[in-house]
Each structure stands twice: as structure tokens, then as C-alpha cells.
Image (spheres, coloured by chain):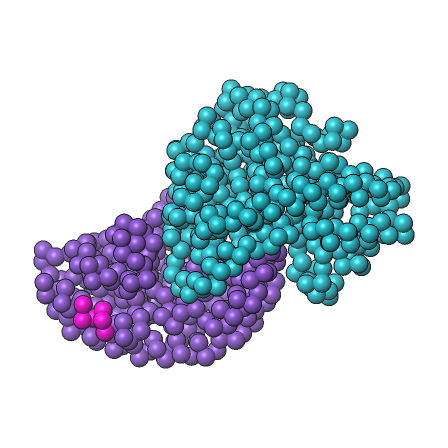
Chain colours: A purple, B cyan
Amino acid sequence: MLHGGNLFEIQRKCNIDKNSLLDYSANINPLGVPATLKTLITNRINDLEHYPDIYYHELKYAIATYYSLSIEDIFVGNGAAQIIFDSIHTLRPQKSILLAPTFSEYERALKSCNTAIVKHQLKEEENFDLDIDKFIKEIDDSIDLIVLCNPNNPTSRLITTKGLEKILQKSREVNAYLIIDEAFMDFVEDQQCYSMLDKYRDYTNLIIVRAFTKFYGVPGLRLGFGVCRNSGLIEQLHQRMLPWSLNTFAGYFGEVLRSETTYVEKTHQWLQQEKKRFVEELKKIEGLKVFSPSVNFILIKILVAGFDVPQLKQRMLEKNILIRDCSTFDNLDKKFFRIAVKSRIHNEIFTKTLMEVMKQ
Amino acid sequence: MLHGGNLFEIQRKCNIDKNSLLDYSANINPLGVPATLKTLITNRINDLEHYPDIYYHELKYAIATYYSLSIEDIFVGNGAAQIIFDSIHTLRPQKSILLAPTFSEYERALKSCNTAIVKHQLKEEENFDLDIDKFIKEIDDSIDLIVLCNPNNPTSRLITTKGLEKILQKSREVNAYLIIDEAFMDFVEDQQCYSMLDKYRDYTNLIIVRAFTKFYGVPGLRLGFGVCRNSGLIEQLHQRMLPWSLNTFAGYFGEVLRSETTYVEKTHQWLQQEKKRFVEELKKIEGLKVFSPSVNFILIKILVAGFDVPQLKQRMLEKNILIRDCSTFDNLDKKFFRIAVKSRIHNEIFTKTLMEVMKQ
């Protein structure tokens, strides 16, 4: 399994204390653990003595209220990863189409179902944006599942709802399901132009995947949810679902959704200012191509001949900074890496260090 | 999904504060959340900002040390339920044999794989003990998976390692796997007579399932592990496994294993004394048959004509006490219920209340 953010492994292998590392390889809100969550964990630590609500009713009610969804369309899971795995294992598709590059867990889940996989190659010269018309041409009768990531990981590029509705139209014609992973969508400012959450009720062949982990800075809590307006499929999902899939504290996350309005505002303020500033600073470094990000992570390409990401990664690690080597993504090579947008003070350290390291 | 311990549902449906309920429907150590766990959650709450170690190396190392296992034979999951589901979904058996009655999640997991299921009916007149020779006769070439629960839930009866080795021998002959769910085994005093943990290295067709939730009083934390001496199967399990299946705090549970020796001793002292005393008191109540328990839960049958568990359950609920109706278990009917062994003070309240209610 290849992912960013494995501080524990770095600590073990390189003998560096994980707390002294600046982790630019995982895309987590630098505002950190919301105060409401800290308080409720501390005050209700003894609730671990009880099984969590097997129906997670309060949590689903809070999610339904927060995002204006119907509670019966919601299913929750142990991170967005479980929503993806449960959806794919329930659908058991014959043939699926994925973007390349994209988040690697779709392919892992599909392979464990022996699904045939078609890759739609995104083009560097088009900034890895999805060309809807070209993509639709690849969706034929043999495809029964399309998986998209919006914004896409690691490219940080968005697809509009207009484009998605075209894809959904075609999916219907060929009897295919569409899974859209919106794990980073909460970071997008004008979400209504990109998220299908407002329109999901129009499509029974659509599953939307969402996560709280990244936006609320708590990947260690494990909490994601799915939305689907297909009662038959929801029933099938529940039938094969693990009991008590969320821990007690994740089950209480509804309180965080209700209370942390300032956290949400502060996050958008930080990202709006810092993303722009950080990108401008990064663009000043010679030998790099910075792809324009839509959210809190940035894809970058090394343009210098004879120098690649494994070398850069090693040099940055020597300065206690982690970056995400993107050569493990299909359709990307050893010239590509991904970094998070973090707090201004850390981003300044990052930019300064990267500049020095590129000059070595 | 029908399980004990759903305080949240009772609170919702009956409008009773969950903290005022005495929950005899879930079998959890009354010593509650270990102090070490409380301290580490409180002190390291900010670690939720990071992904847990995707390999859970430290936890596996602690488990291997504590139980004298080889680290490469261990896989961890989000509760014993995930170990059961992942094992069954990986094996994808054609035909499986289960005990009746037994824990219901094996059947749910098997049904989601469309596995044919044979039930071996345990006999009330034999105290629901497994007759090894009769059982072995039912294992033929068509069976590719046997699932046992030891001690069995809800009967609280054990199978000896001698019996299990006979079953394993037969399983080998017919090319079947054996899953043994030892979720309550830590409560057994002379474990070496019943647990296969000491002998698992002799069998490549054996998966042992263990849980920390019940013994360490933390079902809300979600943490279980599997043990298997079959590197090919372990590899397959890892291939289809969810990434980051445990939350941060569950990943730190190794510290609890290392530190809480007094907790373990106290638990065994409590159970040894209280189980015997509680059973004797329960046996004094007329109209009940109390099956002899091996661990911290007790199966009981109502012998009174015209009175059954749904009626008893309602009357006990009016006194804020929950019991587990066992009519949802195959091979049991509305005369059977299951209760936990809890602290002496609560068990006295329970006995007194049950006595009154039985006289109504």
C-alpha cells in the first residue's frame, strides 16, 4: 500500500522522531483537531465501555442536516476508504473505467473483485483536466462502473457538475454506476458548481463518497460517509456491512458538524489566502512546473534533466520534510510529486528549503 | 443486525437515558476502560492529525510479544467483526458448516458470499456442548470452511484443544479451512486447554480470531486481530484489506497490553469469584434453568409455561435492566436469554429484580 502520511514508517526506517517531521505528503487541514472533538473525547472517554450505536443514528441525522440530505440515503464507514471498498464489493462490477492518474485504492478494491479495468489517460498538456466528450466516448455497454475523484488526487483538478451530469446521462444509457469520490470537496469554495450532493436525488446509479478526515484535520479518527438515492443498493450495502464500523468518538462527530462553524470559516480563509501565495512562491523556483491546484494539495513536476523525485525526496527528508513521490500513480513518472498546502509559517520553510535543495 | 448492547437504540425508542440503564445484554468487563488507555488518549489527542501507521507495526509487535506469536502471522482489524468478514470474504467458501446456536455475524458474512450453509444443531440435553465425533462425521468433501466460536456465544461452553485438533485433522483431509473465534478466550482461566494460540503454527488451514473489546472493557474502541500460519492467505488478506482500518488510539493499544497486568489479574479474580456466586444465586430463582458458564456470560432458559423472554425483557426494561433475548439465535426459542456477569453490586440488583419479576 503506497500512500503519503506514513510518519510511523519514516520514524522506524530513518530513526527520525515523527514529531520533528514536516509532513507535506498528506493533505490534512493544518488547523488540526477541532476543539469540540477534543472536549467530547476527554469528557466521554468512559463511553468506550459501550458498543457504539450500531445504526449511528445521531451521526447520520447530523450529516443529513448539515448537507441537506435524506437520512435514509446515507451510509457511514471507517474512513472514505471503507465507503469505496463497500460500494465496489457490493456492486461487484465486471468492467470499470478509472482516470489515470487517480487515487490508488479504487484499483485495489476493483482488483479484489477481479474487475477488468480501463484507464482513461489524462493529459499533462491539458493540465490533467478531464475532457468530458472524449471520456464519454470510452464508456460503452461493457462498462458497468465508472469511478471518478473530484477534485482528483493527485492532480487537484475539478470536474463541473455540468460535465458530471453528461457522464451520468451516458452511464444511465449503458446501465453503469458512477462513484464520485468527493473526499476533498469540503475544501472547495464554490462547491455547488462541482459537488453532486445537491443533485444526487436525480440519479439512482450514483454513489457519492465523502470524508471528514482531511477537512477536519483528523485522519486518525477514521470517518467517511456515502450518499446514494437507490434504496435497493443501500439495502444491499447494509446487508454486507461490518457491524459497529465506526468507533465511539467517530459516532459523536455530529456535534463537531453542529458546533465548528468558525473552524470551517477559518479553514476557507486560510486556504484562499495561502494557496494563492504558496503557489506564487513555488512558481519562483526554477526548474519546476506547478499545476494550478483547486484545493489543499499541489501537483508539481521537475523540469531539470538528470534530477528526479526520489533524489529530491531524499534531500528533503534530510531536512525533515516529507513530500509525496507520484511515480506510483499510473500515467505519472519520477518527475512528479505532490505537496500539501499547510500554514504560512510552514509553507515558508518549505519553499525556502525546496529552493535550496533544487540548487544543490 | 441483532445484537446486545444497543443502549443508543433503547434510549431513542424508550426515551430512557442510556446512563441509567444496567446493560446485561452485552458481555463487557465491568472494570471498564483501562487507566493506561485513558491516559494515552488524553495525552495524545493531537495525534489524530496524522494517519495511523498503515502497517500498525508497534501494535502487532506488542500482540506478538504478549501472546508469543510470530509477527508476520498477525493481521489486525476494526473489531473481531472485521477479522471475521475479511477472512470469509477472502476465502469465499462454497459451503460452510456452523454451530447452532452461535454468533450471528458468521452467517451474515457467509451469506454475502453466497456460501451454502450447513448448521450443526447443538443439543440442550447435552448443555449445548459440542460432540466432536458427531460433528466430524458431518464434515465431508463438499465443506470448505468450518466456523467455530470458542467459548461459544451465547452458550458460554468451551471446546478443548484436543477436540479442536481432531476437527483440524479432519479439515485437512477434506481441504477445508477452520476459523475459530476466540473473542472471549481471554476470560478463560486455563486458556492453554482451550485456545489454539499455542498450537496455531502446526496448521496452515487455521485462522484464529481474537478481540480486545470485551476483555479490556472497550467495545467502543474497535480492535481485533487474526492469527494464521499461512503466508499465502495472509498475503491475500492484506491485498483486499482496507487501508488504515484501525483508528489512532486502537493503534496504540500495545501500551495497554504491556502495562495493564494488574487489570488482567483483577479481572480473573473478579470473574472467578463472581461467576460462581452469581450462578448460585440465579439457580435459587424458581422457574429458570441456568446453563453453566465458562466465561462472563450466562445462558438461561425460562421453564414456566405461558411466560417467555419478550415478556421478561419488557418487565426488566421497566426496571432499567437490559437482557439479551436469544430467540434470534438459530436452534433457540423465546424461552432463552443471555446475561452478562457484572460487578457484585450490580449482580445483586439484577438477581433481586429478576426474582421479583419472575414472581409477578
Residue B293 falls in which quadrant of the image? top right
On the image, the x and y values in percent for residue A265 come to 42, 79
Tell me which residue sits at (61%, 46%) in the image.
B267
Residue A352 falls in which quadrant of the image? bottom left
In this picture, residue A324 sits left or right of residue B269: left
Tell me which residue sits at (25%, 52%) in the image.
A14
Residue B318 falls in which quadrant of the image? bottom right
The magenta stretch spans which residues? A348-353
Can residue A296 be seen here? The reply is yes
Front residue of B265 and A331: B265
Front residue of A79 and B277: B277
Tell me which residue sits at (80%, 58%) in the image.
B319
**Is A151 rendered above or below residue A333?**
below
Residue B329 within the segment the image draws in magenta: no
On the image, the x and y values in percent for residue B270 come to 65, 46
**Is A224 rendered above or below residue B332?**
below
On the image, the x and y values in percent for residue A252 come to 55, 65
In this picture, residue A249 sits left or right of residue A336: right
Q: Main secondary structure of the magenta part?
A: helix
Q: How many marks?
A: 0
Front residue of A160 and B186: B186
Tell me which residue sits at (36%, 80%) in the image.
A269
**Is B154 rendered above or below residue B218?**
above
Can residue A100 be seen here? The reply is no
On the image, the x and y values in percent for residue A349 come to 22, 71
Residue A350 within the segment the image draws in magenta: yes
